[in-house]
Amino acid sequence: GEDVEQSLFLSVREGDSSVINCTYTDSSSTYLYWYKQEPGAGLQLLTYIFSNMDMKQDQRLTVLLNKKDKHLSLRIADTQTGDSAIYFCAADWGGYNKLIFGAGTRLAVHP
Amino acid sequence: KAGVTQTPRYLIKTRGQQVTLSCSPISGHRSVSWYQQTPGQGLQFLFEYFSETQRNKGNFPGRFSGRQFSNSRSEMNVSTLELGDSALYLCASSLAGDEKLFFGSGTQLSVL
């Protein structure tokens, strides 16, 4: 079945760029997503990319998709302390809002 | 525009009991999905409803069930609770099962 993998932890200095990586196994996924979860909160949709695109930019966020390698990345420019959270990569699988999530990458931003 | 609303925010139950969680989607959204989040298994899909019909379900036992009402509000029920059912249950809505899935803050269920 579908599997989504991501590294578990990333530490960056405030003002630097953060890059969170993700790999997935099912090439039939139509959409790939990035969600953010802060402590005690639900999931916030950050951005998503359609599988026929290779890049999408939205303000400080840049998503890169390498469909050949099944690799997705999220770049956060000028990372701030408020960006500290867990970031989840997800791929749709089987339709009707069935998403397969990675384990999440905990982003720690330090001064 | 109000987001996805889940009630209650916290629940404590004992083994063997049953529980009902409620979800009100974003106004105009007709698709509601449920997910379970645990430290060990991460985020797992439970089921999805659209126009009161279940269109997709994940790999959970029959103790987990749900329904959707004509106003798109949804409930999920867990019967005969087990310790392993302790989790954050997240509800999400979208217009019609499209690409933008918005999540609520979740219901934290603790089974003692």
Image (cartoon, rainbow, N blue to C red):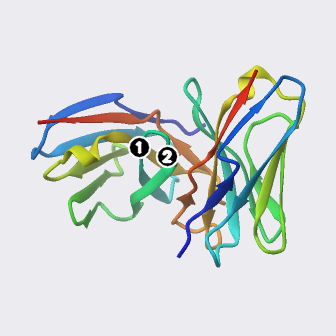
Q: Secondary structure at mark 2?
A: loop
Dot 1 falls on a residue whose secondary structure is loop
Q: Residue furthest bottom?
A: B28
Relative placement, left or right, of A11 versus B101 is left
Residue visible at 77% across and 60% down?
Answer: B74
Query: In terms of depth relative to the viewer, which is nearer, A94 or B112?
Result: B112
**Residue B9, relative to residue B48: is it above or below?**
above
Q: Is residue A38 above or below residue B87?
A: below
Would you say B66 lies left or right of B93 here?
right
Residue B111 found in image quarter: top right
From the viewer's perspective, tell me whether residue B17 is left or right of residue B96: right
Amino acid at the residue labelled 2: Ala
Estimate the spatial distance between the alpha carbons at disc 1 and disc 2, rounded to whole Å. Answer: 5 Å
Mark 1 Cα-neighbour bin, 10 Å: few <14, some 14–19, many ≥20: some
Residue A59: give x, y in percent of width and height: 22, 66
Graded by Cα atoms within 10 Å as few (under 14), some (14 to 19) or many (20 or more), the crowding at tag 2 reads: some
**Cβ–Cβ below 8 Å for labels 1 and 2?**
yes
Of A63 and B51, nearer the camera is: B51
Residue holding disc 1: A38
Q: Are marks 1 and 2 on the same chain?
A: yes
Residue linked to disc 2: A41
Q: Which mark is residue A99?
A: none
Compared to residue B104, the image places residue A9 above or below, namely: above
List x then y, in percent, for residue A91: 50, 49
Amino acid beneath label 1? Glu
